[in-house]
Amino acid sequence: MPPQKRIKLLGPRVEIRHCEKTPETGSWKEAVSHIREAQIQKIRAQMKARQDVLSEGKQLRSPDHFNKEGILPNSKDFYAIKAGDIRAYCWFSRKESGVLWISHYAYKDSKKLGKDDTAQVIQNWRKHEDH
């Protein structure tokens, strides 16, 4: 990911949606700006492959590729899809069955979840789920 010029990934079991209108020029671009140019295509391919697996309704290897990251205001978990040092922070919609929302992408070089990333996930969750 992010797939170029694609906001939705419609799989047979799960539809993946992005909160950002154009993640490839938004948070994805910012996140990969911390990665060596030679590694960006590899990480893009890994992220897309992992999202494809989720869209097919299959599970990713946890905690290597998919991990619980924090708690939403409704006491449900949000997650991170991992590819190298890039994370796609996401949650499974309670409002719409079969939808996984990707809040944003972030570069993460430590194991600790940043407060800014948590705040952004919660802000996006409120916009899409809490109304």
Image (cartoon, rainbow, N blue to C red):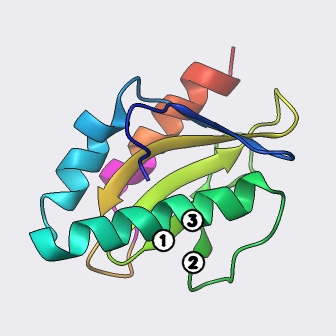
Residue bearing the label numbered 3 = 49
Q: Residues within 10 Å of mark 2 (few under 14, many from 20)?
A: some
Q: Is residue 110 magenta?
A: no
Quick check: 71 above or below 98? below
Residue 79 visible here: no
The stretch of residues the image draws in magenta is: 113-118
Residue type at mark 1: give it. Answer: Lys
Give the x, y percent position of residue 42. 33, 73
Q: Is residue 114 magenta?
A: yes
Residue type at mark 3: give it. Answer: Ala
The front one of 84 and 43 is 43
Give the x, y percent position of residue 40. 24, 66
Label the magenta part by its dominant secondary structure: helix
Give the x, y percent position of residue 31. 24, 56
* Relative side of 68 to 48, left or right: right
The residue lying at 62 percent from left, 23 percent from top is 128
The front one of 26 and 73 is 26
